[in-house]
Image (spheres, coloured by chain):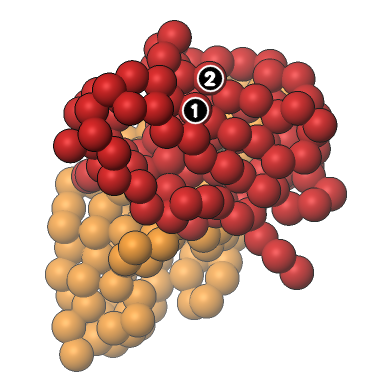
Chain colours: A orange, B red
Amino acid sequence: GDSVTQMEGPVTLSEEAFLTINCTYTATGYPSLFWYVQYPGEGLQLLLKATKADDKGSNKGFEATYRKETTSFHLEKGSVQVSDSAVYFCALNTGANSKLTFGKGITLSVRP
Amino acid sequence: DTGVSQDPRHKITKRGQNVTFRCDPISEHNRLYWYRQTLGQGPEFLTYFQNEAQLEKSRLLSNRFSAERPKGSFSTLEIQRTEQGDSAMYLCASSLQGAGNTIYFGEGSWLTVV
């Protein structure tokens, strides 16, 4: 079945540091790929998405490129801020029902 | 623009009691999803509706759980005879029909069974 694997966390960075969060997937067919963010005490918010190979999703300085050859969708940001502290989930969907399959999530803490 | 709203946001209940959560999706969205999230884990799919029809249920959805969407608008998720293992955040989400369409989540309903 479909699955998403995220790197183990948590991750702690200093403000303005470079961020990479790894995500790889296994899926039948051609999935769409997503990054969702969850701030403390809140629900999930869509951060970015890509629907086909080589697409790059971007939002709020975050980027991720859909790499079919490595089945990856790594999240990057050039300069993190304290306000980026949150839990980040990689997810995919395939098929007509658009049901999302999530990774376990990774907690990012950014120090001033 | 109102997003997905859920009620109540928090619920503490005694083991064995029944609880019901309500979800109001984004108004033009015909798909509605329920997920469960426990601490340190990603959300897990429970069930989804297209309009009023419940089209898929996860095996996580035991016979104590029932979801409805009677008029294709709001939905309810009822848990009967709650157990401590039901403690989790229950997330509702909605989307338009179509592969790759964005699924928008509500803020979740926290359930604590004591």
User: Residue shown at 61%/16% (left/top)?
Assistant: B56
Neighbour class for label 1 at 10 Å: few (<14), some, many (≥20)? some
**A28 lies above or below A46:** above
User: Residue shown at 33%/19% (left/top)?
Assistant: B81
| Pointer 2 chain | B
Residue that badge 1 annotates: B78
- Inspect the image, locate mark 2, and give the three-letter code of the amino acid beneath it: Ser
**Quarter of the image where the C terminus of chain B is located:** top left
Residue furthest bottom as drawn: A112
Mark closest to the chain's N terminus, 2 or 1: 2
**A29 lies above or below A24:** above
Let me know if residue A10 appears in the view. yes
For the residues bearing labels 2 and 1, Cβ distance under 8 angstroms: yes
Image coords of residue A35 (percent x, y): 48, 53
Total marks in image: 2
Q: Secondary structure at mark 1?
A: strand
| Pointer 1 chain | B
Quadrant for residue A78, please give it.
bottom left
Residue that badge 2 annotates: B66
User: Residue shown at 42%/33% (left/top)?
Assistant: B19
Neighbour class for label 2 at 10 Å: few (<14), some, many (≥20)? some
